[in-house]
Image (cartoon, rainbow, N blue to C red):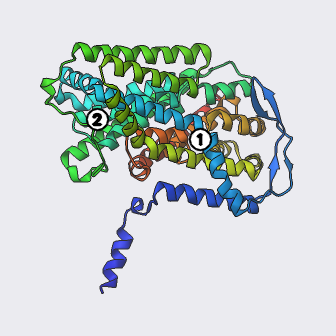
C-alpha cells in the first residue's frame, strides 16, 4: 500500500470534505451543551417584563446551584425542543403544502418561464443580480420566517436560467438572511436594541443601509461568480445529484405564456401574501397566522386551478414528505436552546464575556464584542431573544470602554446577522434550506467564504463607526 500517497491525499483534502452530516453536527452540539452544564457554573440575571418581553437587568448576575444535566435530561430535551419549535415546524409544513399546490397548478413554472422569456436568457447574470437584491429587500422590509414560502420561486428561477439549487439558495436564502441580518429597520435586533439603549427608534439608518447595501452587493457578485464557474465547468457544481423535480421547467422558454387559469392562481397567491403582510404590520401576526394564510392560499389555489380532491390530498402528503426533513431539523436545533436554558449556562457565558470585554482597548473591545455575539448567536439564535439577554449587559460595558451606544448595537447586529448564514441552530435558516432541498453541508461549502468576507467588511464599518464617534 502506498502510504505516502494516502498521506498526500489527506493533506490536500478540502476542509468541506470533513463536514459531518447536519444531524451529526447538531447532535454533537447537543452533547457539548450537556457537558458544559457540568463544566460551567450555573448562573442567572434577574429579568423584568418590558413591553411584554423578559429583559435582563444589568448588574444582577448571581451564580446558582449547579444544574448539570443527566443523560435522561439530554434526551428529554428533544420533545421539549420540538414543542418550543412547533410554530416554525408548522409554518414549514404549511408553506410546503402551499407551494406543492401552486406547483401542481403550474402557475409558478409558467410565471417564472414567462419572466425569463421577457428578460431574455442571454441576460441571465442580470437576473441573478436583480433576484438577489429583490430577495434581500424582502429580508430588509418583511422579516425572516415570513419569507419561507417564497424560497421555491428562487429555486425555479435559478434552474430556469441554467443554475443549480446552490445558486437558488444563494439568490433566495442568502439574500433574505443578509438583508434581514443587516437591515437598518430590523425590529428584532436594531429595534429591540434601540429600546434597551434608549435611542431613537431606527436612528443611524443611513449608515446601516450602507452596510446592508455593501453586503447584498457582495452576495450578488458572489452568486454571479459561482454561476459563471458552473456554466464553464458543470462538474464543479455543488448541486450535483440534488433533486430538482418540480423546480425544472418542462418546456422551452419561448413556449411559456400565462393562461387565464395561471393568472387567477397568481392573483390568489398575491392577494394572500398581501393579506399576510397587512396582518403582520397592523395586527402583529406571526407564525400561527402566517401558517393559516398559507393553508388558505393552498385551498383557494386548488379550487381555482380545479384540482380534484384526490389529487389535492395526494399533492398535500407529497409536499409534507418533501419538507419533513427540514421540519425535523428545526426541532432538533431548538433542543440546543432548551439544554442551555435547563442547564442555566447561557447567562453565565454572557457574564464572562462582558467581564473580558471591560478590560480591553476600545477597538479591540468592539471587535471582540462582535465576536462574542457570533458565539452567543449559536446559543440564542433568536435575534430579539439574544438582544434582550445580552445587550443589557453589553451596553454598559460599551459605555465603560468608550463605545457609543449606536456602535455597541452595530457590533451586536453584525455578530448576530452575519453568522445567521452558517447557524445550524437557526430554525428559519434550516427551514429555508429544506424548501430549497439543499443539504446543510453543501450550503456551508458554498457560503462559508462569503460569511468570512462579510465579517471583514462589517468590521471595517464597525471600526469606522468608532473613529467617527458615530452617534
Q: Residue at x 51, y 47 (%)?
A: 329
Instruction: Return the x and y of residue 416 as percentages of the image width and height.
Output: 59, 39
310 lies above or below 164? above
Instruction: Return the x and y of residue 313 as percentages of the image width and height.
Output: 38, 32
In this orientation, which residue lies closer to the viewer: 20 or 69? 69
In this rendering, which labeled residue sits more in front, label 2 or label 1? 2
Q: Residues within 10 Å of mark 1 (few under 14, many from 20)?
A: many
Which residue extends farthest bottom? Answer: 1
Q: Residue at x 40, y 59 (%)?
A: 16
Instruction: Return the x and y of residue 465 as percentages of the image width and height.
Output: 60, 32
Instruction: Return the x and y of residue 194 as percentages of the image width and height.
Output: 69, 25
Displayed quadrant of residue 244: top left
Q: Which residue is mark 2?
A: 158
Q: Residues within 10 Å of mark 2 (few under 14, many from 20)?
A: many
Q: Which residue is mark 1?
A: 415
Question: Which quarter of the figure is the N terminus placed in?
Answer: bottom left
Amino acid at each position: 500500500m502506498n502510504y505516502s500517497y494516502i498521506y498526500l491525499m489527506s493533506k490536500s483534502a478540502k476542509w468541506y470534505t470533513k463536514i459531518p452530516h447536519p444531524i451529526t453536527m447538531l447532535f454533537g452540539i447537543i452533547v457539548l451543551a450537556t457537558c458544559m452544564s457540568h463544566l460551567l457554573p450555573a448562573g442567572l440575571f434577574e429579568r423584568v417584563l418590558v413591553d411584554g418581553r423578559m429583559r435582563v437587568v444589568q448588574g444582577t448576575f448571581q451564580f446558582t446551584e449547579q444544574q448539570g444535566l443527566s443523560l435522561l435530561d439530554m434526551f428529554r430535551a428533544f420533545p421539549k425542543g420540538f414543542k418550543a419549535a412547533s410554530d416554525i415546524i408548522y409554518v414549514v409544513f404549511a408553506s410546503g403544502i402551499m407551494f406543492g399546490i401552486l406547483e401542481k397548478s403550474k402557475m409558478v413554472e409558467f410565471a417564472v418561464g414567462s419572466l425569463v422569456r421577457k428578460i431574455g436568457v442571454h441576460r441571465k447574470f442580470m437576473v441573478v443580480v436583480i433576484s438577489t437584491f429583490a430577495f434581500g429587500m424582502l429580508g430588509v422590509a418583511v422579516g425572516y420566517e415570513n419569507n419561507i414560502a417564497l424560497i421555491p420561486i428562487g429555486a425555479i428561477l435559478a434552474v430556469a436560467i441554467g443554475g443549480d439549487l446552490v445558486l437558488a439558495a444563494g439568490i433566495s436564502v442568502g439574500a433574505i438572511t443578509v438583508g434581514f441580518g443587516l437591515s437598518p429597520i430590523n425590529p428584532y435586533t436594531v429595534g429591540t436594541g434601540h429600546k434597551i439603549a434608549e435611542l431613537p427608534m431606527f436612528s443611524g439608518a443611513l449608515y446601516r443601509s450602507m452596510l446592508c447595501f455593501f453586503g447584498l452587493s457582495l452576495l450578488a457578485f458572489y452568486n454571479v461568480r459561482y454561476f459563471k464557474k458552473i456554466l464553464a465547468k458543470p462538474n464543479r457544481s455543488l448541486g450535483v445529484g440534488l433533486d430538482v423535480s418540480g423546480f425544472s421547467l418542462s418546456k422551452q422558454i419561448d413556449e411559456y405564456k400565462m393562461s387565464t387559469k395561471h393568472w387567477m392562481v397568481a392573483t390568489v397567491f398575491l392577494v394572500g401574501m398581501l393579506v399576510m403582510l397587512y396582518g403582520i404590520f397592523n395586527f402583529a401576526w406571526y407564525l400561527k397566522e402566517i401558517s393559516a394564510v398559507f393553508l388558505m392560499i393552498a385551498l383557494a389555489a386548488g379550487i381555482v386551478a380545479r384540482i380534484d380532491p384526490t389529487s389535492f390530498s395526494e399533492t398535500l402528503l407529497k409536499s409534507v414528505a418533501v419538507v419533513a426533513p427540514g421540519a425535523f431539523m428545526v426541532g432538533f436545533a431548538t433542543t440546543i436552546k432548551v439544554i442551555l436554558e435547563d442547564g442555566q449556562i447561557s447567562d453565565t457565558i454572557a457574564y464572562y464575556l462582558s467581564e473580558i470585554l471591560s478590560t480591553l482597548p476600545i477597538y479591540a473591545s468592539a471587535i471582540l464584542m462582535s465576536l462574542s455575539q457570533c458565539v452567543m448567536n449559536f446559543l440564542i439564535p433568536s435575534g430579539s431573544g439574544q438582544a434582550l439577554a445580552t445587550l443589557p449587559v453589553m451596553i454598559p460595558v460599551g459605555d465603560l470602554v468608550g463605545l457609543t451606544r449606536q456602535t455597541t448595537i452595530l457590533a451586536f447586529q453584525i455578530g448576530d446577522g452575519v453568522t445567521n448564514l452558517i447557524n445550524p441552530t437557526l430554525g428559519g435558516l434550516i427551514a429555508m434550506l429544506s424548501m430549497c432541498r439543499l443539504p446543510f453541508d453543501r450550503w456551508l461549502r458554498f457560503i462559508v467564504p462569503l460569511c468570512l468576507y462579510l465579517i471583514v467588511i462589517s468590521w471595517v464599518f464597525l471600526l469606522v463607526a468608532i473613529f467617527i464617534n458615530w452617534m
